[in-house]
């Protein structure tokens, strides 16, 4: 199962969705929004809105008090969610309601510490029960991931690892062999956030990653508009957008305007990936 499509559970839905986009000759659009932002209900509504706008997959962020890989926009949203009292139960509810409303793949993106404290077996069982497709684990070293992968595979959950431009080819092979669902290629070194340019570094990383795996390779960090989405869609299997969605919510005068804004952005980005 490792380094391949997930064969059971909702991880299969993720693999099928990415395969369907490829069959249409396009990249998939993957959106990120944190749970509990601006509220738990508001976060669920925002996820439904980006699906309505044209996202194929959504990553639900599990807010963390020390999000070392996230830039100021997502840190701000996480802080709002945490001050609102968001708990792992709220993350699971967000996944459940988003999946049940849309039937589309919903992943959780989280740092390892909250899962470790909560319990791997409990977390994977609850995520699968909620209809979750898997987890993106940006700070879990592959060599320490056996326990997680054992339980994820048991519940049909994809395990998505992150590769970076600094990853050497041998390391890429090690990471991709352990993963499932897709590979998250960080387009550049540094934290999340919008960028003026996504650049050639990402294309080189995608090419090197593809040499090690049959898994789809999806690019995140820095994409914020349709033109950048089209650029990345020209060489990647998926385009991941997070900070741009969160910024639209933060900048909106009220929640209704925020929902309209993220729905509109999803539509623009969906056109971008289809026009590549």
Image (tube, rainbow, N blue to C red):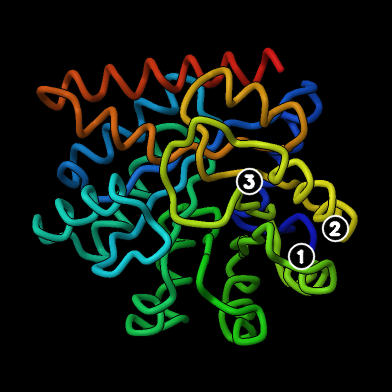
Q: What element carries label 3?
A: helix
Instruction: Find disc 3 in the rendering and name its residue.
Output: 14
- Residue 45 image position (x, y, % from top left): 26, 32
Where, quadrant-wise, is the N terminus in this rendering? Answer: bottom right
The part of the image, by quadrant, that contains residue 145 is: bottom right
The reply to whether residue 99 is visible in this rendering is: no
Real-space Cα distance between discs 1 and 3?
17 Å
Please indicate, yes or no, whether residue 72 appears anywhere in the rendered image.
yes
Mark 1 surroundings within 10 Å by alpha-carbon count, few (fewer than 14), some (14 through 19), many (20 or more):
many
Q: Name the residue under label 2.
A: 213
Precedes in sequence: disc 2 or disc 3: 3
Tell me if 216 is positioned left or right of 92 in this view: right
Q: Where is residue 240 in the image (x, y as percent from the top left)?
A: 55, 39
Q: Viewer-proximal residue, 7 or 48?
A: 48
Badge 3 density bin: few <14, some 14–19, many ≥20, Cα 10 Å: many
Mark found first going from the N terminus, 1 or 3: 3
Q: Of helix, strand and loop, which one carries label 1?
A: helix
- Marks 2/1: CA distance? 6 Å
Q: Where is residue 79 in the image (x, y as percent from the top left)?
A: 17, 56
Q: Relative to residue 172, is residue 71 drawn left or right?
A: left
> Which is more N-terminal, label 1 or label 2?
1
Taking the spot 40% from the left edge, 67% from the top edge, the residue there is: 126
Asked which secondary structure carries label 2, the reply is loop
Q: Quadrant of the C terminus?
A: top right
Q: In this picture, is 152 found above or below 187?
A: below
Query: Residue 176 got which mark?
Result: 1
The quadrant where residue 197 appears: top right
Residue 212 percent coordinates (x, y): 87, 60
Residue at screen point 31% across, 49% down: 74
Q: Compared with residue 101, is residue 96 higher up or lower down, i.e. above or below?
A: below
């Amino acid at each position: 199962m490792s380094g391949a499509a997930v064969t059971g559970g909702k991880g299969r839905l993720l693999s099928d969705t990415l395969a369907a986009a490829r069959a249409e000759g396009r990249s998939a659009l993957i959106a990120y929004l944190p749970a509990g932002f601006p509220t738990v209900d508001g976060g669920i509504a925002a996820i439904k809105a980006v699906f309505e706008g044209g996202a194929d997959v959504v990553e639900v962020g599990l807010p963390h008090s020390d999000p070392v890989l996230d830039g100021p926009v997502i840190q701000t949203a996480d802080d709002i969610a945490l001050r609102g009292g968001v708990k792992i139960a709220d993350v699971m509810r967000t996944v459940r309601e988003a999946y049940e409303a849309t039937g589309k793949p919903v992943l959780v993106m989280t740092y390892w510490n909250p899962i470790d404290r909560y319990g791997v077996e409990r977390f994977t069982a609850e995520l699968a029960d909620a209809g979750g497709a898997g987890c993106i684990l940006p700070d879990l070293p592959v060599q320490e991931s056996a326990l997680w992968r054992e339980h994820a595979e048991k519940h049909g959950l994809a395990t998505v690892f992150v590769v970076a431009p600094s990853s050497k080819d041998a390391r890429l092979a090690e990471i991709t062999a352990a993963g499932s669902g897709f590979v998250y290629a960080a387009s550049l070194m540094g934290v999340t956030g919008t960028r003026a340019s996504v650049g050639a570094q990402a294309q080189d990383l995608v090419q090197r990653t593809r040499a090690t795996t049959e898994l789809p390779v999806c690019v995140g960090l820095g994409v914020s508009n349709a033109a950048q989405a089209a650029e990345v869609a020209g060489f990647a299997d998926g385009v991941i957008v997070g900070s741009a969605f969160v910024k639209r919510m933060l900048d909106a005068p009220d929640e209704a305007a925020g929902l309209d804004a993220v729905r509109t952005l999803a539509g623009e980005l969906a056109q971008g990936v289809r026009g590549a």
